[in-house]
Image (cartoon, rainbow, N blue to C red):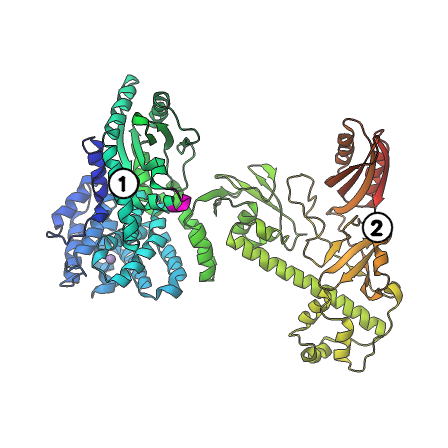
Amino acid sequence: MAYWRRSSRQMQAATGQVAVAPTSPVTEKPKSRSRMMRQYDLVERVRTYNPDTNEDLLNRAYVYAMKAHGTQTRASGDPYFSHPLEVAAILTNLKLDDATIVAALLHDTIEDTEATRAEIDNIFGHEIGVLVEGLTKLKRLELVSREAKQAENLRKLLLAIADDVRVLLIKLADRLHNMRTLEFVPHASRRRIAEETLDIYAPLAGRMGMQEMREELEDLSFHTLDPEAYAVVMQRLDALADRNRNLIGEIESQLSKKMQKHGITARVYGRRKQPFSIWTKMERKSVGFEQLSDIYGFRVVMPDVESCYAALGVVHTTWPVVPGRFKDYISTPKQNDYRSLHTTVIGPGNQRVELQIRTEEMNQIAEFGIAAHAFYKEGMGSPTERLEHESNAFAWLRHTVGILSESANPEEFLEHTKLELFHDQVFCFTPKGKLIALPRQANVIDFAYAVHTDVGNSAVGCKINGKFAPLSSELQNGDEVEVLTSVAQSAPPSAWESLAVTGKARAAIRRATRTAVRDQYAGLGRRIVDRLFARAKIEYADDKLKGALPRLARASIDDVMASVGRGELKASDVARAMYPDYKEERMVRYGAKKSLAVKLKLKAPPHPARSASVIPVRGINSDLPVKFAPNGGAVPGDRIVGIVTPGEGITIYPIQSPALKDFEEEPERWLDVRWDIDETMPQRFPARILVHNVNEPGSLAQVATVIAEHDGNIDNISMSRRSPDFTELTIDLEVYDLKHLSAIIAQLRAKAVVAKVERVNG
Ligand code: MN
């Protein structure tokens, strides 16, 4: 089996003679190769895993690239051609197909030599031409100024690799070789390249399941960016390696003995964690080196899945298990296709050891990720097509790129992508089976916006795996999510903005609520203005107002109306701006007779709270300019009046509310309103009742049951004991209308435990 350079040392370690690699390859000075790989070396490498390789094609590419690069040299002084050759060699370790190897050999020719796409198409065929062109585009991206363009570059990178994942594999190999020889590059660009590697390429490799690649890229970057920290970690690792020299052999022999009793052969090899991952763990958890218990990992490779579980059984009966560390990634694979059983035990010498138990195939995928999906299955279509079926990681890539190509703003892209792209994801599905990738901790709101902004804006409920669930439910891998929408909801509740996890959802919610609020204020403002003009018997015309805009210091008629609606501008100011000699008439008290009815659109999802699980959206969105009286509310059937509060909007009171007394001196704040209820879409509204309950066991439960049985929602209950015999319950309810409320009150009064019920009008 071909391994990375470092892995060959790990293989040595597996023999038990050398416990842990004495040095890491990244600490070695990159050496100029005294002998470049020859044509036959390369062909030989390919032939070990692909006996049917097209030798002629490989040979032609070798010669073509060598000639094209001619006497060019690298910063190291090596002939330039050594670079594409090394890149191709890295890819033979991944056992890639001829087209990939050939494209690797040619990857810098279009950009750096006389070679052209047409020529490459001619000699090597269209497939290879496309790959080389993809890499050429990526190379050009790198030349663009980085600060401003990083987001856009990353986006283009992802777009390019989504067409054919082999472009990514070649790009990663290219970057790996450049990182291995970074020493020769001027200091300033060294840092930049290392940072970019750490920011983009290493996580991308990890996301594609290519852990070996990711780790080497990380360690090389770490070494460049913080050589001192790197040295410290390495020193400690070496010291530990000395101390635990025999651990691997011991574990292996004990395990093998036990397994043999069960007729199972296991291959065990040890592998220490990589310096960069140890460093980040130390930084993240701010723990010292000594406290990192899981520096040693052991891989137990089994012939099949069944024996993985058998091995787990043996391990768990041989050594004490560290609780809470067992994970079954075989039955639930990670998003990058990783599968293994993880457990930590107190092993020989009281040493905590982490074991990863897996099959050979899982081992391949763990190390090579997306590249391990054998490209050599006959008659299985193109690698891209096959990968879409076989690899979650690739499906994710495709999906992410889909989102990216829709988002116009590169900064927005960075916000979402850098945060979300490279961290753990959850993968969920629409009822039609479309994959939706979301960051961990995302909920259904995020899901809805990921499907479509309109779906998000009109989401009122959801089913997860066929069961009703709250929109705030955190999504789990593999969830099938059906978002229930309602045309009655044109804008999402603004509270969702803080519930949403993804930047996309947050931005959309912000946008939608801002627009909705503004529209509502403008609508309200227009009605207030209309009313004043009607009463004053002066003519209103948009054109006339347009002429008065400068005087009102507003940019548009909508601005004026929204300002009036918000109470920032008085309707009389508008009138005066249009008719300078307008004099404010005395307001008629309440203005009730002549005033126009303000139609209130009170929007709510259908049966918003019929299942307790749905996010309560009460009648109206909280940030719209209409809300209900704070202590008691109002329900359809009540006669209502609106009170305008500048900067806040309208509060609806039932006409019998004692609170209205406070506004008697301010008739201009009174607004005539009426209900505008869509009978086909029942909505709930807040009401408060006061219940005097007999103190006996279960009496509160009886009250709650009556309310629930009659389809009332209890929003809140507060209790105070007035006497040894009675408790006063203040219950905030949500009901459909006055009839509904009255029915509930009547049913409560019929209960023996209820002494008295009355409605509260705040
Ligand atoms: Mn290159």
Between 490 and 21, the one nearer to me in the picture:
21
Q: CA distance from mark 2 to mark 1?
A: 76 Å
Residue nearer the viewer, 125 or 729? 729
Q: Residues within 10 Å of mark 2 (few under 14, many from 20)?
A: some
Q: Can residue 301 be seen?
A: yes
The residue identified by callout 2 is 638
Judge left or right: residue 692 versus residue 121. right
Q: Nearer the viewer, mark 2 or mark 1?
A: 1
Question: Which comes before the other along the chain, label 2 or label 1?
Answer: 1
Q: Is residue 257 above or below residue 186?
A: above
Where does residue 86 sit, x and y in percent of width and height? 19, 51
Kindly report the secondary structure that dominates the magenta region of the rendered protein.
helix
| Residue 642 screen position, x and y as percent | 80, 58
In the rendered image, the residue lying farthest to the left is: 34
Give the SS element for disc 2: loop
The residue sitting at 32% across, 37% down in the picture is: 295
Start and end of the magenta stretch? 283-287
The mark found on residue 237 in the picture is: 1
Q: Residue at x 18, y 53 (%)?
A: 85
Residue 437 location, x and y as percent? 47, 46
At label 1, counting other C-alpha atoms closer than 10 Å, the crowd grade (few under 14, some 14-19, many 20 or more) is many
* Quadrant of picture, ligand 1: bottom left
- Identify residue type, mark 1: Leu
